[in-house]
Amino acid sequence: MTEAAVSLSSVVKRFGDVVAVDDVDLEIEDGEFFSLLGPSGCGKTTTLRMIAGLEYPTEGSIRIYGEEMGLRPPNKRPVNTVFQSYALFPHMTVADNIAFGLQMQKVAPAEIVERVANAIDLVRLTGKGDRRPGQLSGGQQQRVALARALVNRPKVLLLDEPLGALDLKLRQAMQLELKDLQARVGITFVYVTHDQEEALTMSDRIGVMSDGRLLQIGRPDHIYEKPANRFVAEFIGETNFIEGTVAGPGVVTLPDGSTVRAGTHSAVGTPVTLTLRPEKILLEAAGTAPGDWNTMEGTVKRRMYYGDSLYYEIDFGYTVVDARQENRPRIQRFSVGDRVTVLFDPAAAEALTE
Amino acid sequence: MTTGRDRSMTTRRLDRILAGHSALVYLFFYLPLAVLVFFSFNDSRFANRWEGFTLDWYRAIPKDQALMNSVKNSLIIALESTAVATVLGTMAALSLERYKKWLGKRTFDALLYLPVIIPDVTMAVMLLIFFTQINQALGLTTIILSHIAFNISFVAIVVRARVSNLDPSLEEAASDLYASRWKSFRKVTLPLILPGVLGGALLALTLSLDDVVITSFVQGPGATPLAVEVFARIKRGVTPIINAVSTLMLVASILLILGSLLIQRRQGSATRGG
């Protein structure tokens, strides 16, 4: 097995009394696109800055390709950063910005010229080398920041919400471009974002953070389908929570006494919360109950039309559940007051204990 | 109800009043200057009656040993105190803006601006007592030290404004791109705050050349700068040579300010990337 690109063990960062990063263990694989995802103030940026050397951990150790970083300053680490504000040097041209890192490393001038030209081509800014950052659009500045970091051929590229300042269309285009770029250069990317969609579409793996703690690490589909706790389930996508109690292996009793089958390994009697995504629910007219799927009888309380889909609020008396129905042909529609059967795969309902 | 025509007439009248007011303000500012310059070319020993055009007073300046000596003193004092105050003031500004917390920072912050606030006379007496206490003979050294003392504050204020507008992530980016602390200062921080530093230096230079109060307290024999020399002579009666010297000082100041504006404009457009 190859050595981890970045490895954090028991990393703690305190600012005075505030614990910004709380005992984080993390291994990022070589060549991986890894995202740290969480709301603002969750410690994701602080974690990134500690890898870059812009902050030092209060406790714990950070290794990059096996090498202990300790109190090594940022200019002596094999990583480069794309800053949220881009942090382009306003008094230098695009080419000078990109050449800066190479000049500081005392690379031969002829090689600098060649590598800078290649980097400018790589980010599709050919011909813009003589411009100053202020003369470029947000998307172009973003690409200069990328080129300025990548030209140094870092072992790890750190990106701090690099698309945050761009508008939606541009952001979506840049997501594809970034993912594509990462595949081409083959460098490990550590990507910090609060945008769950960005993390899901781009990452090989995601680490979800909240209040300084790393709550779950996994592939995007794993994080989405099998969230480890309520926070992860709620932060990524939309979900329904249904309270219940474990009645046996894979069986949960709901407040009305009925039972459903769900993913649980907890002991009998443990109070759990079922998480069930709105799009995992099928709605059928009352009475039909196929296969081993769970069925729950409810009443349509409200219907919302979104064009490509319909949202139903289904009332069960003890709780209300959102169900999403794609607006496909031949789908059966329901009206407010209708009795409906809610159907879902036991694998789609995870029983969470925290 | 006022019609559009009424309103435009009121506006026009208001415009005229404001224009007249501005003219009076400018007259108040610049008439004394014009009189000063005008009489420096007056072919008369007395500064109140026009006798004809002459450059004699300007020709007399180089021959006036005491005056020339005071010009030399002024330049030495201004250049040396400006150089030291600019370096120290810039360091103080960077330290106050850039380094988050150090012991006594807030006290230092408040104390730094004291020389700007306290009256010149107080500062002058204070410095005089200090120099006497440490047995420092009064002369060029004491003047230079005093000028450094008050100029640090002014430089720090000007530079600080510039530093506070600087995105701290620029320095982080520099160090992330393998620049040492010193290199990151030289290549990124300094070029970006340079307009502020030059502006501060220019202010320091002007204040040093101008100062009369503090300088006259801490000066010693043979170390009289121009401003104090001129003031001393006026007490003995105004001669047009003072007008001539003052005119030259005025021209020098204008050139300095124009120069600094040019530098700032070029630097400013560079930082905005325009």
Image (tube, rainbow, N blue to C red):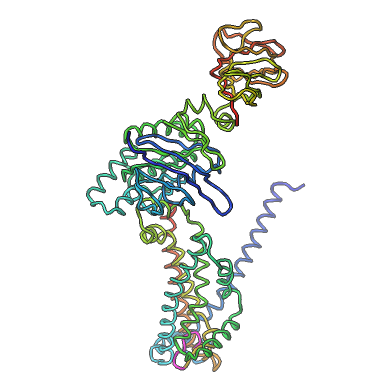
What residue is at 73 percent from the left and 18 percent from the top?
A317
The quarter of the rendered structure image containing the C terminus of chain A is top right
Q: Is residue A243 visible?
A: yes
Nearer the observer, A163 or A256: A256
Measured from the top left, where is residue B166 in percent x and y? 48, 56
Measured from the top left, where is residue B236 in percent x and y? 54, 94
The quarter of the rendered structure image containing the N terminus of chain A is top left
What residue is at 31 percent from the left and 54 percent from the top?
A104
> Horizontal placement of A169 versus A101: left or right?
right
Measured from the top left, where is residue B240 in percent x and y? 49, 88
Measured from the top left, where is residue B172 in percent x and y? 43, 53
| Above/below status of A295 relative to A141 | above
Report if residue B222 lies within the magenta region: yes
Residue that lies at the very extreme toward the right in this rendered image: B1
| Above/below status of B139 relative to B82 | below
What residue is at 56 percent from the left and 10 percent from the top?
A292
Dominant secondary structure, magenta: loop
Report if residue A65 lies within the magenta region: no
What residue is at 49 percent from the left and 65 percent from the top?
B95
Q: How many marks?
A: 0
Q: Is residue B274 visible?
A: no
Nearer the observer, B116 or B20: B116
Q: Quadrant of residue A321?
A: top right
> Horizontal placement of B209 versus A327: left or right?
left
Q: Quadrant of residue A228?
A: top right
Q: What range is drawn magenta here?
A: B221-228
Nearer the observer, B37 or B144: B144
